[in-house]
Amino acid sequence: MPILPSALFTRRTIATACVTGSLVLGPAAYGSHTPGPPALGTPTSASASMPSGGNPSATPMPGMSPGNGLSAQQDGYTLTSPTATLPAGKAATYRFTITGPGGTPVTAFALNQTRRLHFYVIRSDLTGFQHLHPTMTGDGTWTAHLAPLQPGHWRLFTQFTPDTGPGKGRDFVLSRTLTVPGTAATTALPPPSASTMVDGYTLTLRGNLKAGMMSPLTVTIRKDGKSVTDLQPYLDTYAHLTAFHQGDQAFAHLHPQTKAAGGHGGPTLDFMVGLPASGNWRLFLQFQTAGTLHTAAVTLHVR
Ligand SMILES: [Cu+2]
């Protein structure tokens, strides 16, 4: 199959969230538990179609988006890289800089979830997810070590907060495309589901998500039929959520309000999620147990 035209890819969207017991974006705090959100479906259901009823817990999203994440440039800040293609099937190095309004590389970044820059890799069919933390040299050159990529069209996202200049304190998400030559075998997006498995863990999702609204999303983690309570802090939280969207260019940036306070999170993770567009989202939920990072993926439908 030939590589998909990149125009298709520009319609993808990324959203990220990191969560502990409670993740909040905007003025409406997700306080003590009101009656939980309705189930997306039974754990074995292949469908996660949303109930048609209203969601009393949903609130409008605040207008503080850092952008849709699909541009290499925003408000004078630019993601620059000499690399537009990388070989297939082998680990590769990707170097880039973030230049500021003056055109020189930014070297001062604020810590965000314990890191100065978060880097995400996704293929046009929403497979091949990687979440990396590149290193920076003194001149502002970042180096990311990518795991082997399959042929196709990819998008590489940077998420950062400048600590100097006119963008100081603002959250940015900038991205560039990358082509990996070869015969691309694309994978159909799995249908929406209320549960998924990874490494023997079963994750069950409950929520009633509506585009443009902040809504609670609850994820429960079980293993061998038992509740998992040994989640370890990962990037200051008990779970890291990254979401990519099909068919819309809007971007949602979510961040945690509370941090992991101990080494025993779980089994329930409460997210406050605002996804700006309806349709299907591919969620990648990362959590850590016994020093091992697990990455679960599930497709979520947003009304
Ligand atoms: Cu990160």
Image (tube, grey):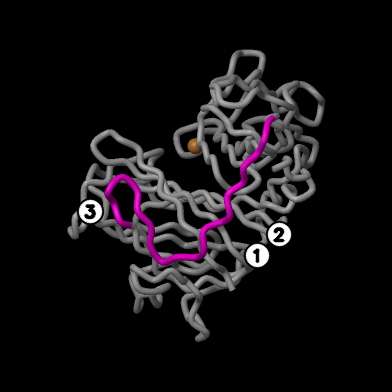
Highlighted magenta segment, given as a residue range: 182-202
As drawn, 255 above or below 81: below
Alpha carbons under labels 2 and 1: distance apart: 6 Å
Name which residue lies at 42% across and 72% down.
40
Mark 2 vs 1: CB contact within 8 A = yes
Sequence-first disc among 2 and 1: 2
Amino acid type at image mark 1 = Ala
Amino acid type at image mark 3 = Lys
Name which residue lies at 68% across and 46% down.
69
Principal SS element in the magenta part?
loop
As drawn, which residue projects farthest toward the bottom?
A: 53
Sequence-first disc among 1 and 3: 3
Sequence-first disc among 3 and 2: 3
Amino acid type at image mark 2 = Asp
From the viewer's perspective, is the residue at label 1 or at label 3 nearer? 3
Mark 1 Cβ inside 8 Å of ligand 1: no
Q: What residue is shown with label 3?
A: 223
Secondary element at tag 1: loop
Mark 3 vs 2: CB contact within 8 A = no
Q: What residue is shown with label 2?
A: 248
Q: Is residue 49 left or right of residue 290?
A: right
Q: What residue is shown with label 1?
A: 277
Secondary element at tag 2: loop
Residue 118 placement (x, y as % from top left):
55, 35
Alpha carbons under labels 1 and 3: distance apart: 32 Å
Residue 119 placement (x, y as % from top left):
57, 34
How crowded is the residue under tag 3: few (<14 C-alpha within 10 Å), some, or many (20+)?
some
